[in-house]
Amino acid sequence: MKFALLWASLLWPAFALAVDNNVEPVLPLAQLIREALDQNPEIKAAEQRWVSAQARIPQEQTLPDPKLFFNHRELEKRETMVGVSQEIPFPGKLGLKGEIAASEAGMLEQNYLATRLTIAAALKEAYYDLHFIVKSIAIVGKNRRLLVQFEELAEAYYAVGKGAQQDVYRAQTEQSRLLARLASLEQRKQSLSADINRLLNRHPYTTLGIPEEITMTPLQHSQEQLEVLVGNSAPLLGTQVKDVERSDKTIDLAKREYLPDFELSAGGIREEPTGLNGYQVMLNVKVPLYFANKQRQGVREALAGREASKDDLQNIRQELLFRVKDNIAQAQRAEELVHILQDAIIPQARFTLAAAQASYGVGKVDFLSLLTSLLTLLDNEIELHGEIVEHEKALARLEGIIGERP
């Protein structure tokens, strides 16, 4: 009767039951992303840098501040002069400075957009990792409880001389190993929770809850379409495109530095004791006398800067295309493994465990085979959730590159 009760408790349906009665609140991913985009300090800083750069555009397009001057001279006569002077750059220079500032603002706008995408992708990856850890904890805990039942069964068999004492020790050893695994998973869970809170600009000890269920999302674009999207809309690439535009305008401005700037001044004069009034107008011209060491080298500097920007653009383009290809490959591999695990490996592992349970009950299989079947199924179930998570993380990274669902 004792064996029958123990064996009834080991039937497979009992193995599949949920075991955690303390249900934590569900943590919606969409809500976390909205909060991160609103509260993340890195995003806010990038936005403020963009706003700051926009404020520089009218400053660069405006004439330098005028100068007021006062001059008093005492010789045979007393002369007093009051006037104003204005520096006037050669026509076209202020416009180019404004265009350069606009390009810099465009760079920072693209950087702001790229930062939003990067933070959202990082949050998704941490969220998916947390989902995997929570699932792993549940699976390991479920297997540990089943191991307790296996230990009780082994003790019962040993008590009546049908089993070996080493079977009990093996069950206890595997329980201890699973406890150690649970401790590692719990530590990883705490670290991921703190990382998510960091991205949300929350206190690291803020309670989060458990992630919602996730399923594999199919790719909506081919590799060729994704590569086109990289060239057309990727903010990471757009930042460098704006840098090349700025470099072109910097060259134009450097060439205009060969042309002189002007300073126009005008003032009123009063002479004492005659009481005569007059005025004075003066035009100063800044001559680029040292052009060999200044203007020529300035053009050379600008040209080298443009070439560096072009090389950086090509490097980033190649880097993004590699990342697209790499993440597509990771997503395809994970999708293939998920189908194999779901359709073949896990059903076979469950059948093997059920068969080992039945055979052990009649003495046809030793305890080690039963234990191996259980641990194999444990690893397969954890691997399944891990591959689902890896698939979604690859898609999150792709979205962080192209700026839309891949």
Image: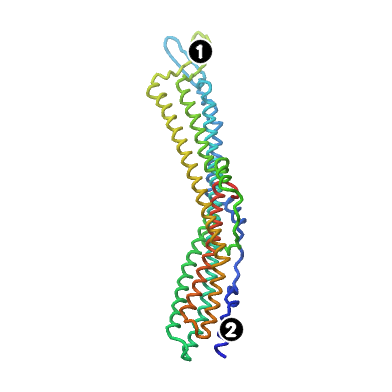
Residue that appears at 47% across and 81% down: 367
Q: Give the structural element (helix, strand or loop) at label 1.
A: strand
Q: How is the image coloured?
A: rainbow
- Position above or below: 264 against 361: above
Check the image and name the residue furthest to the front: 364
Q: Say which residue appears at 60% left-offset and 50% top-offset.
A: 405
Q: Name the residue at the left extreme.
A: 293
Q: CA distance from mark 2 to mark 1?
A: 112 Å
Nearest the eye: 381 or 285: 381
Q: Earlier in the sequence, mark 2 or mark 1?
A: 2
- Judge whether 287 appears above or below 145 on screen: above
Tag 1: Cα neighbours inside 10 Å, few (<14), some, or many (≥20)? Answer: few
Closer to us: 85 or 332:
332
Q: Quadrant of the N terminus?
A: bottom right
Q: In the rendered image, which residue does mark 1 sit on?
A: 280
Tag 2: residue type? Ala
Q: Nearer the viewer, mark 2 or mark 1?
A: 2
Q: Residue 280: horizontal and vertical position, in percent?
A: 50, 13
Q: Residues within 10 Å of mark 2 (few under 14, many from 20)?
A: few
Of residues 389 and 186, which is closer to you in this image?
Answer: 389
Callout 2 secondary element: helix
Residue displayed at 55% across by 41% down: 231
Under mark 1, the amino acid is Gln
Q: Please tell me the numbered disc located at residue 7.
A: none
CB under 8 Å between callouts 2 and 1? no
Q: Considering depth in this image, is 235 or 217 the residue closer to the camera?
A: 217
Residue 103 on image: x %, y %:
53, 34
Is any part of residue 201 visible from this angle?
no
Tell me residue 388's x, y (percent): 55, 61
- Residue that numbered label 2 is attached to: 8
How far from the left and from the top, in percent, is residue 149? 52, 81
